[in-house]
Image (cartoon, rainbow, N blue to C red):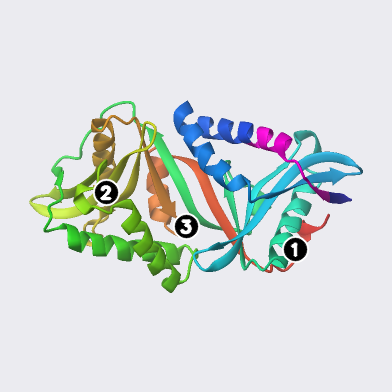
Amino acid sequence: MTEFNALGDSTEWQKDFERRLRASYTAAGLGAAAAERRLEEVRDRIGDWTVAEIMDAGTRVGYVAVAVADKNGTLAGDIGDLRVDVSRAGRRHEQAARAWAEAWCAERGARRLDVRLTEPADELFDGYSVRGQTRMRLITSLPEPLDGVTARPMTEAEYPQWLASEKAAYVGDIVRAGALSPEEAVRKSDRDFAELIPEGLATPDNTFLVLEAAGEQVGTGWLKHGFLPGVTFGYALYVHEQHRGKGYGRAAMAVGEQATLAAGDSALMFTVWGGNEVAMNLYTSAGYRVVEENRSIGLPRTADPGSAA
């Protein structure tokens, strides 16, 4: 029978966890400095996690780490880590640990449980909905632009309408992914944009672009350079709906990659929200690998056959 023993001292677990996480980030293409920066973000949260040993007949066979916190007005749980030793895999310890984490968080009032995966999801989290993915690609050469598509800096006159459109699209992405309610998504959108671009077009290390074809605006782009060491983050590379299906999505990505190299970075990273299968397929075909995937499920969850110890 699988049992769980909460740790008073999680130092040994943290060393192992950071080693595994660093290896996953490196395998996804992040450089050493970028992987370390990503780790620092995780370390900031580790102090709030409860870490338990997964035990089998008195022998530790793995770890599970959990936490509950307020997220944009909703009490939500997190599975920060769930690992079973390779030699003990396949004996349903993973399912027991998942069920323990769900119960632990539900008992503390969580209405949702989130998990962040750095490896492809297996059947353990099949029942969790995909809320979003972080994708990245190393850019080794200057991409070929699509014939007839050009990019220019956004003007001050174009910025207000662009900002309103981007904030509305962001709200729609969050709601479609099932991450937040419409009201919570609006608050998050207002807060995030105010924090990310407080000076509008003049915000340092940001590039704002307009894509044009045949003299007509077909899309826009917003990129943050130095988001991580050597990494530009594409907050938005958007093709207007009436111009989709013409190859402009690839053109927008090429423009983003050109801007990334021009800023001195060597990798371009995106977030794609759950439910946006078109964008996911585009990124996959263009060679953008999944760095992290966020999934979640509502709590309390009805027990399933996979949750038995």
Q: Position of residue 9 (x, y in %)?
A: 75, 41
Q: What residue type is disc 3 on?
A: Gly
Mark 3 sits on what residue?
A: 274
Whether the residues at callouts 2 and 1 have beta carbons within 8 Å, the answer is: no
Q: Which residue is mark 2?
A: 222
> SS class of the residue under badge 1?
loop
Along the viewing direction, whichever of 47 and 261 lies nearer the viewer: 47
Which residue appears at 62% of the width and 68% of the height? 111
Specify few, some or many for label 3: CA neighbours under 10 Å numbering under 14, 14-19, or 20 or more. Answer: many
Q: Earlier in the sequence, mark 1 or mark 3?
A: 3
Residue that carries the numbered disc 1 in the rendered image: 304
Stretch in magenta: 4-17
The amino acid sitting under disc 1 is Asp
Q: Is residue 86 magenta?
A: no
Q: Nearer the viewer, residue 19 or 290?
A: 19
C-alpha span from label 2 to label 3:
20 Å
